Amino acid sequence: MLWEESVYPNNREAFHMRFLLHHAREPISFEDLKTVIVRHEDGDILQIKPCSTYTKVCQVLELLEDDSHWYQARE
């Protein structure tokens, strides 16, 4: 097991980059981590979305939670 240095959530980009490194399958480069490939159920590629930040990639992949469900419940 490799030793990993702590990255705290208040350093958003570094935190989300590390989060993606734990969830990505064979990333080739850091720019590769910023590219989201949307696939159809049968595995065909539907769309390739380049993102500007690691945070945006996490949002597109729905890896992050926010409080929107609480706001929707109140309406």
Image (cartoon, grey):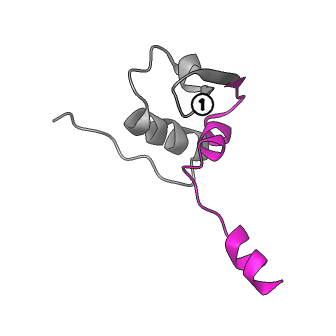
Q: Which residues are magenta?
A: 49-75
In the rendered image, the vertical position of residue 36 relative to residue 59, given as above or below: above
The extreme front residue here reads 42
Q: Give the residue at x 33% y 41%.
A: 5
Q: Quadrant of residue 13?
A: top right
Nearest to the observer: residue 43 or residue 13:
43
Q: Give the residue at x 59% y 61%.
A: 65
* Quadrant of the image containing the C terminus: bottom right
Q: Quadrant of residue 45?
A: top right
In the rendered image, the vertical position of residue 43 relative to residue 28, given as above or below: below
Q: Position of residue 14 (x, y in %)?
A: 53, 39
Q: Position of residue 56 (x, y in %)?
A: 68, 40
> Mark 1: few, some, or many residues within 10 Å (few <14, many ≥20)?
few
Q: Position of residue 55 (x, y in %)?
A: 63, 42
Q: Position of residue 10 (x, y in %)?
A: 57, 54
In the rendered image, the vertical position of residue 24 relative to residue 75, given as above or below: above
**Residue 60 as seen in the image, left or right of residue 2:** right
Queried whether the magenta region covers residue 5, the answer comes back as no
* Quadrant of the image containing the N terminus: top left
Nearest to the observer: residue 8 or residue 33:
33
The extreme bottom residue here reads 74
* Amino acid type, mark 1: His
In the rendered image, the vertical position of residue 39 relative to residue 29, given as above or below: below
Nearest to the observer: residue 4 or residue 34:
34
Q: Secondary structure at mark 1?
A: loop
Residue highlighted by disc 1: 40
Q: Give the residue at x 50% y 44%.
A: 15
